[in-house]
Amino acid sequence: MVYSLTYRRPRHVASSKRGSIASEKTGQSIGGSTLNDSQNAAINYGIPEALSFDRIIDGGTCPPCTTRDFMNYLIYIEHAAENLQFFLWYQDYTKRFDQLSENERKLAPVWTAEQAEAQILAMKDSPAPMKTINAETAALFKGTDFAPPKATVVEMGRGNPFNTPPMTPENAERDSLAPSEYPWSDSGSTLRSGFKASHDKKSAGAFDAAEIKLQPFTVQPFREEISRIIATYIADGAPRQLNLSSKERAALLHALAITTHPSAFRQVIRTVEWTLRHQAHQNFIRWTICNGNRPRVIFARGLGIAGIVGGIVAAILIVLSNAGRGWRVFSAIGFMIGIATLIAAWKGMCVVLHGMHHRHLRPWELFAEDDDASSVMEMKKGSFDSFGNSNSYEDQPWIAKYDKRNLIRKVFDREVWIQEPALRQIQDTIFLQALLGSVILTAICVGIFVALPRGRFY
């Protein structure tokens, strides 16, 4: 079974289109199951319902389209895993908040849409806060007209701003939280006191940076957990800082200073959910359709071009000979194989791998069996830990191992069967499109050569 022959795989959505979020997300749900009818949107974007965003998040898909695969894509390819990590935490947090007793929920009032809009309007009328400047930069402008006020000069670390922070070592001690019934979350409200002061300090610094004088109510439920969320995702320079504007961040912090109700995240979760549904998910499906790694796809394109060139050379030799016109049809073999291989490879597919419904293992999957089982489990847990460190992966052992593999070995790397039926159907459709396109183009090419007169050179 295949999809329509007019099927087109999802288009790639660049991150620069984030500016259109505000105009397109109006009326969308907060952590709900749909955003302006996600089923129709999925079909329009070339994503079948079986691979919809909600289906993947709910665990209704098979490898390589699971939540784990989605997380790995965001970590290693798109470098934006913090959006999915925050989204999963928010879903879990909302469920746990709703399970509180009525008296506990009353301590954290709902942050209404009217309050959020009033806060945004108030921020538009207020002047922008002063930006802090590095002491070294301020020294360069000292004595000039560009010298900054002393109040804006702060001491900053000397670390390279272009390097991502290293991941936590394997034997480092992680924060222990009350377990959640959700399989992907380690979040909870009971924190170890050894780490409480550090996150409270970062959270207080975020409130001070937003010029919020109101102290948060500590008696509200999950207040300590919210402090960790601010230190991990919201504060400027946080290890998993979300891509929020300064006004979005300030509005969220103002709401969190008053309440820990999930509605305080209303505007932020809309932005995060929109990005996941209409950018990350779409790019993930497009990337997953490719069944070969980059060296294999380039190799397949080369074979396709070689087949086309072989068909052209064969046709020319027959035309220049004394052979009859019927012999020129044999050049169609080269054209047919070459064009079909090239079309499929242009869409990221290797026809040889597709014939077995196989795919190449991802570089981070190749060495999972060789690495220590405890380190692999720690790495998997870290990406789904709502309060882990940054999503840096430069020091993971598979990177050095994969770089040492020669090109031939990368082209013929290990393979695994594709378990997801919907993905196999998409690939079958693309393969059929490649065959039909090859038949049409081959008929045109062969027809041109058949129409030429014989050269009779030999």
Image: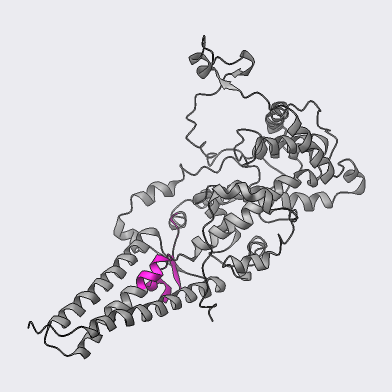
Residue toward you, 34 or 77: 34
Image height of 208 relative to 162, above or below: above
Q: In which quarter of the image is residue 406?
A: bottom left
Image location of residue 110, percent across then percent down: 85, 45
Image location of residue 451, percent across then percent down: 24, 85
Range of the magenta residues? Answer: 341-363
The N terminus, quarter of image: bottom right
The residue at the far right in this view is: 103
Q: Give the side of residue 330 with respect to residue 30, left or right.
A: left
Residue 66 visible to an observer of this rendering:
yes
The residue at the far top in this view is: 143
Tally of marks: 0
What's the residue at 72%, 34% (across, down)? 250
Residue toward you, 101 or 284: 284
What's the residue at 43%, 57% (across, down)? 366
Q: Quadrant of residue 452?
A: bottom left
Q: Is 443 included in the stretch rendered in magenta?
A: no
Q: Give the side of residue 185 with respect to residue 94, left or right.
A: left
Residue 378 visible to an observer of this rendering:
no
